[in-house]
Structures are given as C-alpha cells and as structure tokens.
Amino acid sequence: MNKPGLTYNTEKEQIVISEYGRCIQEMIKKLPEIEDREQRTEAARYIISVMVQMNPNIKQSSDYEHKLWDHLYMISGYNLDLDSPYAPPTPIEHQKKPQHIGYQNNTIKYGHYGQYLIKMIEAASLEENDEIREALAYSLAAQMKRDYLEWNKSVVSDQVIIDDLRTISGGRLVIDDEAKLNASGETPAGKAQQPQGKQQQPQQGKKKKKKVPNLKANMNNPNNPAYKKRMQEMGKI
C-alpha cells in the first residue's frame, strides 16, 4: 500500500545496529557528504557522544570508546575517511563466521532414561560385590522409574523398568519380578539405601546453660547483705 507522505520502516533500509536506532544511522550516512575532513571528523565525534546516550550500557566495557568507533564504521559500511583515534576495522573481521562446533553423533536406544543414567547402569554392572550390586540395582531402578514417568507422564509397569535394567546391564543387575519399585529408591525390606561412611547420630536435646550469677557485681551492690557484712569486717561501717 503506497500513500503519499506515508512510509513504513519495513520499506526503509535495514538498521545495522538496532541499539542506536534509525536516526543515528541516518546521521552516519550523511557524514561522507561533508567535504572538509576536519569538519567530518568533528561531526563523527559528536555522533559518538550521541551514541553513548542512546546505548549507555556500552560504558560498562573498559574499551567502550574503541567499540563506538568500530560501530560507527560498521554502520557507515566501512567507507568513512576520518581522523579516528583507533585503527578502522575491516569488514572481514566482523563478517567472518564462527567455527561450527558440530553435533553429537551419539545414538542411545533408551533416550527417555538419559545418557548419564545409562552410563551409571554400565558402571554399576561392573561391581563384584553382590550386596552392593543389588542395592545399586534398586536405586537405579527407582531413578529409571522417575525418568520414565517424567518423559511419558503416565503410569509405567515395574516389570518394564526391571526388564530394561536387566537388558541395559547385560543381565548383571537383576531385580525380582515380584518386587515393588518406588520413587524413593527403597529396598524390598523397606529400608532406604544410605551411603557407607559415618552414620548420622540422632540429635539429642541441647542442655540449657545455667546462668551463673556475677558475684563480683553483686559484692559491690550496697543493698547486698554480703556487701554490708564485708564492709563491717573491714571496719568501714
């Protein structure tokens, strides 16, 4: 839709750096029209001062003045001839694309459990102690059930978790098919597994400290009978 005297921003030139706005960009585009080099440089310094007001957060950087002059050249299209205090940047420095970091090619069959849980199951399956391996199996199964419910948002059968744990561990982590799993990681006996080490002692009630009277302060109190008796012994009363 074209109307006389009416233009839309979508029809105008794209803003190079949006933080400074279109007005700053139009001012910079007018700089090459100034023939005198000194006047052109002075006008550029004035635009730099306005750019600071439009984007005050840039002052948080230690070299913000250098960045402002770089932004000035970038907005102008790198075609300014000024007496800049800094070396003008080149288009290659800003148009160079960053190196691609690549994507992971790891394929995991049980993605809803997560890669780290699969590694934990593989590490637990190497445990030689039968009791520790059984305790790890129940703890890992409980975590598998939580992850499955978080992924599927529905009810999951304990048998599915038990079968998946047996398959992932290569048959090393086996749980009784009749066992009931819960999200707290408890064993069939109903006792939650605790890491080996120092057992936490139950806290006993703290004994209140008895207030010890300040005898020295009381002996200097004239209303204290002990003070009067001491004065009588010293012959001062």
Image (tube, rainbow, N blue to C red):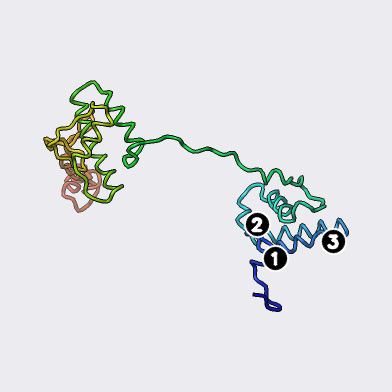
Give the x, y percent position of residue 178: 12, 37
- Residue positioned 77% across, 58% down in the render: 44
> Callout 3, which amino acid?
Ile
Extreme right residue here? 36
Q: In terms of depth relative to the viewer, which is nearer, 31 or 155?
A: 155
- Earlier sequence position, callout 1 versus callout 2: 2
Give the x, y percent position of residue 115: 36, 36
Secondary structure category for the residue under label 3: loop
Q: What numbered label is drawn on residue 34? A: 3
Residue 137, by quadrant, is top left
Position of residue 162 in the picture relative to residue 50 (left or right): left
Extreme top residue here? 128
> Callout 1, which amino acid?
Cys
Residue 121, by quadrant, is top left
> Callout 2, which amino acid?
Ile
Task: State the separation of the CA atoms marked 1 and 3.
Answer: 18 Å
Task: State the separation of the CA atoms marked 2 and 3.
Answer: 23 Å
Residue 37 drawn above or below residue 131 = below
Residue placed under numbered mark 1 in the picture: 23
Secondary structure category for the residue under label 2: loop
Q: Residues within 10 Å of mark 1 (few under 14, many from 20)?
A: few
Q: In terms of depth relative to the viewer, which is nearer, 105 or 237?
A: 105
Q: Residues within 10 Å of mark 3 (few under 14, many from 20)?
A: few
Position of residue 77 in the picture relative to residue 35 (left or right): left
Q: In terms of depth relative to the viewer, which is nearer, 71 or 202?
A: 71
- Residue positioned 17% across, 44% down in the render: 208
Q: What numbered label is drawn on residue 132? A: none
Residue placed under numbered mark 2 in the picture: 17
- Are the residues flagged by discs 1 and 3 in contact, CB closer than 8 Å? no
